[in-house]
Image (cartoon, rainbow, N blue to C red):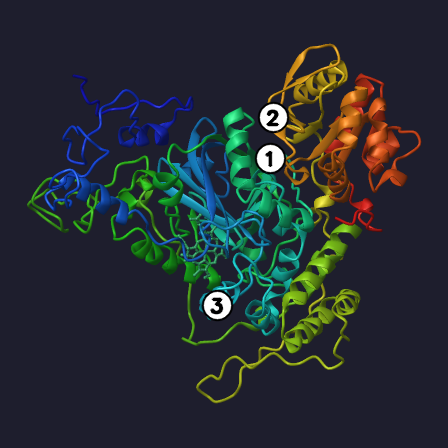
């Protein structure tokens, strides 16, 4: 008889303190015998216990009861927002000590690799919704530091919809599916969302981001992250500075096209989850640099906006982002539920050297995150779930509660105590004990908003003006789509009014798409507050001039475009393909870090023109152009003829063209390009210049073809193809 092992091993290569702390809690059933939850070896897991072969099932069957009961209780509530997400383990390494501004240990020791767990998410959709919704993406990082957990719970957009936590439930109720019919899933394109937004001018800046391509990333690995609020750093001397956190992806910031996003949602709703998983499994570890913008306390009022207002960025031109370290995600979770679902982030998890500000949105979050875990994870001991445990030991007088894991020894669970030596002991600040930043507060209690929060349009305008032409077009298209899905004309008109305050040209273009006129008189937002003195609070926006007209960092056009690592490239082929034309391109792409799939009319192997056999990765039934970054058609007369007669192959190319992707063809395969809708756009001759502007490469020039194709793929997209729209599908 085999013995049951209690300990286990993992095959994952990465090792750090957090991974080690998870180890005793993992289990691997390889070569093991089946037991009940109580350790009894099971003889038959196929049949319930019955009174005779056809008899009734006996209540006595504790094995059946245990199995069904556990199953019946498998689900926990999904997150009230950010329900859909994907996680990964990694490490953070500091470039240089930040002792001038913060005493946080992990920001001072360049030798230490701090373990992290990251969860990316969409906001509005349910746990099973598509990854490609137009939405904000959550970017939550748990640093397991030697001073306890620090959670940087951010988003992929640097601002937020609202300025005060009081409005958060309203915002979420408005964007979630409408309460009468639970429609639509994972989409903001509906009446209640835009009703709310059109009455909340403070959301205008965020709405510009949400309507931009940032809301449809190509990959979690290709998005920026932002802490959003202004936080505080505090150094050893107790001197504080303001800080904004940024994550800068080393692969650059890239997005898909909206039409593509909608198609991906059908073809592979797990697109981002799969992309993250596969990249890590293949060793193409995603990396971000952590950046900080630091503002000395004395400069608090030097900007035209309020640092406490979460609807504002600090333009990088005014305060540069200093890159202070690098995060690498190098290990997939072992179990989605245990790790990604049960991880509990809290913006209030800070370490000495980092503290909060009075941003009224941040202040509300400090309450909400613990509160939500109590219902989601079922009680006050969620910090004991392995993924949530710090890598340092925990000692305090908190006790008991559902599912308590820790067995606390001794008589005393209170302090001060003399019976137990007054342990556990408080720690002096000098020895690392946390003390809150001693901000001076001298104020009346009031329920109101600071006038310094009332400029709602200047940064919305700054964002729009900083975009490239294609990005501007996408924003206008996105507004036209979203408002086009809104049924109530008054809401559309109210939004046009708001847009006209950002830029009359955007309002006019969206109005044209909606078949409406921009209203001359802007409807005043509903008065939202009547303080005790009976005077209606003045929520009317004020105009403030932005100190800069454009900010380079806001446009994705200016992002890194220097390689094709982990980019997915489709090679379309059929029997009779020229093996050399296929293999040389495949090798060149793979050497550059690309991931190549051979797609053929059916699965199995292809018989190449030299009789060699080439394994097929996907068929036209299982693959789709929207799941790839680029496409190549190798030579071989029979292969090309088969593909030309295969509507799915021609469609593949048409769609790749429509979504502005790099396309390459061997000179023998030119005829299939000519069978596409974009045949008239194929340049007569290709050169480096045409490749970089048109993204189409063809010919039989061996290495040069591959080299130029790689350059084209690195450009990500050729948005100039979008207008006029050539491809009907
Ligand atoms: Fe959250 N938010 N939030 N949020 N948030 C949650 O906490 C909340 C806000 C963010 O992958 C919830 O554990 C309030 C801003 C991320 O597990 C909840 C307010 C930013 C995640 C909650 C905000 C975020 C959450 C739901 C306004 C960017 C997912 C489940 C006062 C800086 C974390 C949970 C994960 C999750 C409340 C606003 C980011 C209910 C009340 C601003 C990335 O506690």
Where is residue 7? Give x, y as percent.
Answer: 24, 24
Tell me the quarter of the picture where residue 66 sits: top left
Residue in the picture at 71% in, 20% down: 575
Tell me which numbered mark, 3 or 1, is placed earlier along the sequence: 3
C-beta proximity under 8 Å, tags 3 and 1: no
- Dot 1 or dot 2, earlier in sequence: 2
Give the class, few, some or many, for how many residues have Cα within 10 Å of label 3's Cα (few <14, many ≥20).
few
Q: Are marks 2 and 3 in contact (CB under 8 Å)?
A: no
Quadrant hosting residue 88: top left
Give the side of residue 699 with respect to residue 265, left or right: right
Which residue sits at x=16%, y=38%? Answer: 53
Q: Is residue 72 visible?
A: yes
Between disc 2 and disc 3, the foreground one is 2
Labelled disc at residue 181: 3
Q: Residue furthest right?
A: 684
| CA gap, disc 3 and disc 1 | 33 Å
Q: CA distance from mark 2 to mark 3?
A: 42 Å
Q: Position of residue 485 (x, y in %)?
A: 64, 66
Q: Residue at x 84, y 36 (%)?
A: 675
SS category of the residue bearing label 2: loop
Q: Position of residue 273 (x, y in %)?
A: 51, 40
Horizontally, is 323 left or right of 55 in the view?
Answer: right
Local secondary structure at mark 1: loop
Disc marking residue 603: 2
Query: Which of the labelled discs sits on residue 94, or is there none?
Result: none
Asked where in the image residue 569 lies, by quadrant, the reply is: top right
Asked if the residue under mark 2 is in contact with the one under mark 1, i.e. CB atoms within 8 Å, the reply is yes
Label 1 sits on residue: 622
Query: At 25% across and 53% down in the image, what residue appears?
Result: 379
């Amino acid at each position: 008889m085999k013995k049951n092992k209690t300990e286990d091993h993992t095959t994952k290569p990465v090792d750090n303190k957090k991974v080690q702390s998870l180890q005793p809690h993992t289990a691997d059933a390889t070569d093991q015998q089946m037991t009940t939850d109580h350790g009894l070896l099971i003889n038959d897991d196929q049949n319930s216990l019955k009174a005779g072969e056809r008899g009734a099932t006996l209540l006595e069957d504790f094995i059946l009861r245990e199995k069904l009961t556990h199953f019946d209780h498998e689900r926990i509530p999904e997150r009230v927002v950010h329900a859909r997400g994907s996680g990964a383990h990694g490490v953070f390494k500091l470039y240089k000590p930040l002792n001038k501004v913060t005493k946080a240990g992990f920001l001072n020791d360049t030798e230490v690799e701090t373990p992290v767990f990251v969860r990316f998410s969409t906001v509005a959709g349910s746990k099973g919704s598509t990854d490609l919704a137009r939405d904000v993406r959550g970017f939550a990082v748990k640093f397991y530091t030697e001073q306890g957990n620090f959670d940087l719970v951010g988003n992929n957009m640097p601002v937020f919809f609202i300025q005060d936590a009081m409005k958060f439930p309203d915002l979420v109720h408005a964007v979630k599916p409408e309460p009468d019919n639970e429609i639509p899933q994972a989409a903001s394109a509906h009446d209640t969302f835009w009703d709310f937004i059109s009455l909340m001018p403070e959301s205008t800046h965020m709405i510009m981001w949400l309507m931009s391509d940032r809301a449809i990333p190509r990959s979690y690995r290709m998005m920026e992250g932002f802490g959003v609020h202004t936080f505080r750093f505090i150094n050893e001397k107790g001197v504080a500075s303001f800080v904004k956190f940024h994550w800068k992806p080393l692969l650059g910031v890239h997005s898909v096209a909206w039409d593509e996003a909608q198609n991906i949602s059908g073809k592979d709703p797990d697109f981002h989850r799969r992309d993250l998983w596969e990249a890590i499994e293949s060793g193409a570890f995603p990396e971000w640099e952590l950046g900080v913008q630091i503002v000395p306390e004395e400069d608090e009022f030097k900007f035209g906006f309020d640092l406490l207002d979460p609807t504002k960025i600090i333009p990088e031109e005014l305060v540069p982002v200093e890159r202070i370290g690098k995060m690498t995600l190098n290990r997939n979770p072992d179990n989605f539920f245990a790790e990604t679902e049960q991880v509990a982030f809290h913006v209030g998890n800070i370490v000495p050297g980092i503290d909060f500000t009075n941003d009224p949105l941040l202040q509300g979050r400090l309450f909400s995150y613990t509160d939500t875990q109590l219902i989601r994870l079922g009680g006050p001991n969620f910090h004991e779930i392995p993924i949530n445990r710090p890598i340092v030991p925990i000692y305090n007088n908190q006790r008991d509660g559902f599912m308590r894991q820790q067995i606390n020894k001794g008589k005393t669970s209170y302090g001060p105590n003399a019976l137990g030596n007054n342990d556990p002991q408080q720690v002096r600040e000098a020895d690392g004990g946390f003390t809150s930043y001693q901000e001076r507060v001298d104020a009346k209690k009031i329920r109101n908003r600071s006038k310094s929060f009332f400029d709602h349009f200047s940064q919305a305008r700054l964002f729009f003006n900083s975009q490239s032409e294609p990005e501007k077009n996408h924003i206008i298209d996105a507004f036209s789509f979203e408002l086009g899905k809104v049924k109530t004309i008054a809401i559309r008109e109210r939004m046009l009014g708001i847009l006209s305050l950002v830029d009359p040209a955007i309002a006019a273009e969206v109005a044209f798409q909606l078949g409406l006129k921009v209203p001359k008189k802007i409807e005043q937002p509903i008065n939202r507050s009547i303080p005790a003195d009976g005077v209606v609070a003045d929520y009317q926006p004020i105009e403030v001039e932005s100190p800069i007209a454009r900010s380079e960092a806001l446009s994705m056009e200016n992002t890194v475009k220097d390689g094709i690592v982990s980019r997915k490239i489709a090679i379309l082929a059929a029997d009779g393909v020229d093996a050399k034309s296929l293999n040389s391109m495949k090798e060149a792409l793979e050497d550059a870090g690309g991931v190549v799939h051979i797609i053929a009319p059916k699965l199995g192997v292809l018989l190449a023109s030299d009789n060699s056999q080439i394994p097929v990765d996907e068929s036209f039934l299982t693959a789709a152009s929207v799941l790839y970054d680029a496409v190549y058609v190798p030579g071989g007369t029979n292969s090309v003829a088969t593909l030309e007669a295969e509507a799915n192959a021609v469609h593949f190319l048409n769609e790749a063209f429509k979504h502005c992707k790099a396309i390459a063809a061997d000179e023998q395969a030119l005829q299939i390009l000519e069978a596409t809708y974009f045949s008239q756009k194929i340049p007569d001759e290709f050169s480096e210049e045409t490749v970089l502007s048109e993204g189409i490469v063809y010919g039989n020039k061996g290495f040069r073809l591959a080299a130029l194709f790689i350059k084209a793929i690195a450009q990500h997209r050729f948005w100039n193809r979008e207008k006029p729209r050539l491809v009907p599908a």
